[in-house]
Amino acid sequence: MTVTKAEPVTTTAARIRGLEVTFAPRKATTVTALTGIDLDVPRGSFVSLIGPSGCGKSTLLRVLADLVQPTAGTVEVLGGTPAEAREHRRYGFAFQQSTLFEWRTVRRNVELPLQLGGMGKDERAERARRMLELVRLEDFADHRPSQLSGGMQQRVAIARALSFEPQLLLMDEPFGALDEMTREHLQNELLRIWRDTGTTVVFVTHSITEAVFLSNHVVVLTPRPGRIHAHIDVPFGAERPPDLRNAPEFFAKVTEVREALRSEGAL
C-alpha cells in the first residue's frame, strides 16, 4: 500500500506573490524572465496563461512544478511549497511533446510514474485502466506509441499526468504541434476530463481562441520581462458545446483577450 502525506486544506490551488525569475547564462549577463507576478489560482478552475514567445509562460509553469527556482517572491502550491507538491506527487505535468517510451505499451507508459512511486502491480494496473477509460483509449492499452496518432499519444500523456489523481494539472502547450481538427477534438476532451475530475488546470498556450474556449480565467502576460497585464474572466460555464466557437459572445471574449495583448505590444 502506498501512503501519501495528507494534503493541506485550502481553497487556492496556487498562490504567487512578488515572483521574480532571473537567469544568468553567463556571469556578465542576466535575463529577467518574470517580475512582479501576483497570481491566485482557485481550486477547480481552468486558468490559461497567454502572451508572446519568451514572456515567461513556461517558466511560470515550471516554478509551480519546482523545476525552476524563484529569484524572489513566494510560491505556494496546494497549501505547501512547490518542492512539497512535487515530492508528494500533488500535481501532474503534460508537456508539448507526449514523451512516451516506445518500448512500453500504452498501459505501461501510464503505469510508469506509479511504478517509480512504489505502487503495487495490481493497484497501478487498475489505476492505469481507469485513466485510459477517462481519455477513451482503453481499447489501445496494449498498443505501442508508434501505432497511435499524435492526438492519441497526447491523450496517453494526459492519462499518465493524471495517474496519481493530482489536484493540479500543469500543461505546457500540449496541443501546439497538432493539426487544427485534432486540436479542437482534444480541447473538447480536456474540458470533459476537467469536468469529470474536478482537477485544477493551469494551461500555457499561444492560441487566443484555445485560451477562451477552455478557460474560466485567462491571464495575459507582457513581453519579457513577463508581468501580468490582465486577468480576464470567461463566463461560459463548464459545459461548452463545440458550436460555442461560432457564438458572438465567444468572439467578443476573443477580441477582449486580443486587445489586451495588443495594448502591451504582444501582437
Image (spheres, helix red, strand yellow):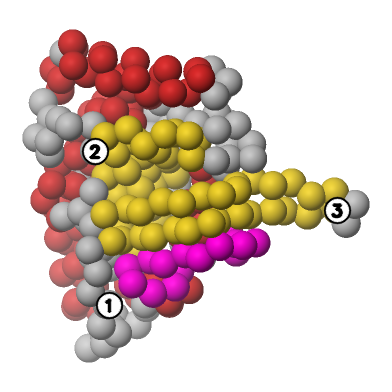
Q: Which residue is mark 2?
A: 216
Which contiguous range is marked in magenta?
Answer: 67-82
Query: Tag 2: residue type?
Result: Asn
In this view, the residue in front, 41 or 115, is 41
Which residue is at 54% across, 24% downward? 264
Q: Which residue is mark 3?
A: 26
| Residue 71 is covered by the magenta coloring | yes
Checking the image for residue 8, the label placed there is: 1
| Residue 258 is covered by the magenta coloring | no
Mark 3 and mark 2: Cα distance apart in space: 40 Å
Eye-nearest disc, 3 or 2? 2
Question: What SS does tag 1 mark?
Answer: loop
Residue 185 vs 191, above or below: the answer is above
Q: How many marks?
A: 3
Which residue is at 24% across, 38% downward? 216
Mark 1 and mark 3: Cα distance apart in space: 39 Å
